Image: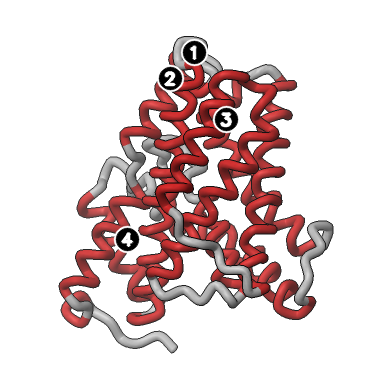
Amino acid sequence: MNVQFDTSQMSPADHAALIDAVRRLERVGPALRLSRMVGRKLNLAKGLAPEKVGKIIDGAAMAAMRAALRAAIASLAGKPLQNRNRAHKLMAAASGAAGGALGLVSLPFELPVTTTVMLRSIADIARSEGEDLGKPEAALACLEVFALDGREIGANVTESGYFAVRTLLARSVSEAARYIASRGIIDETAPALVRLLAQLGSRFGVVVGQKFIAQATPALGAFGGAAINLAFIDHFQSLAKGHFTVRRLERQYGEVHVRDEYQRIAAARFPDEIRPPAA
């Protein structure tokens, strides 16, 4: 049940954590800005890419989400995702190097590996913020992280991009969690899971397109691909920290009140990212 809340009732440490979460969730980090800039300079953003390339990117994004879903659900069966942060980054760098060296042909194979590695790191962040990954809703919240950065820099939105995405996904996540809880097995053809994977894949595909374009730049090669994958995993780790901080505070102070304070902080501190509705 939500409790009454005002800023004075939130501890200074929790309020500082919320400010940090807003920064992580509403601002695009320098590494991703660089990745996007490379793609724009090549004039090969996903929307302008040949249809065949777009289909490969979309297919790779969906395959990555299916792999991530299987990994997330594995945690429900008593197979905890281990905290091996350094190993995760090394694996992401290695798969990025392969992508940078081989280009588009490697994407359908490299991306599911990279995404599963990232999910394991995201799951550890979730546990550190008090999530019980034995519950379907918490496991699926890990997947939500991959959908949190599917908008352009400076997009004109009437509320935080973060809460807009959560609202968009809320029904699908709830239905998928109920399905998993009631069946105890995973059928990826089940309508509830198909809807969720389609929404996640669509948003994740935007970032995947930007990643691929930057990674496939001939001048970068394998070294550049590894560097971009490290930036990629750092970025989603940061989003995960913000996401699960907000969820922790919602459990403590109430969803509505945390959301209101989040929006106030976002509008006051990051006006370039959060714009009011047009008059």
> Mark 4 touching mark 3, by CB under 8 A?
no
Q: Residues within 10 Å of mark 4 (few under 14, many from 20)?
A: some
Sequence order check: which comes first, mark 4 or mark 2? 2
Sequence order check: which comes first, mark 3 or mark 1? 1
Sequence order check: which comes first, mark 2 or mark 3? 2
> Mark 2 touching mark 1, by CB under 8 A?
yes
In this view, which residue lies farthest toward the top? 219
Nearest the viewer among 279 and 269 is 269
Residue placed under numbered mark 4 in the picture: 263
Percent of width and height locating residue 135: 59, 77
Q: Nearer the viewer, mark 4 or mark 2?
A: 2
Viewer can see residue 158:
no
Viewer can see residue 181:
yes
Amino acid at circle 4: Gln
Q: Which residue is at 53% across, 36% downward? A: 207
Q: Which residue is at 44% across, 22% downward? A: 224
> Mark 1 touching mark 4, by CB under 8 A?
no
Residue placed under numbered mark 3 in the picture: 209
Q: Which residue is at 62% across, 69% downward? A: 79
Residue 58 vertical position relative to residue 72 in the rendered view, above or below: above
| Separation of marks 1 and 4 at Cα, in angstroms | 35 Å
Residue placed under numbered mark 2 in the picture: 38
Residue 2 vertical position relative to residue 229 in the rendered view, above or below: below
| Separation of marks 4 and 3 at Cα, in angstroms | 29 Å
Q: Which of the 4 quarters of the picture holds residue 202?
A: top right
> Mark 4 touching mark 2, by CB under 8 A?
no
Residue placed under numbered mark 1 in the picture: 42
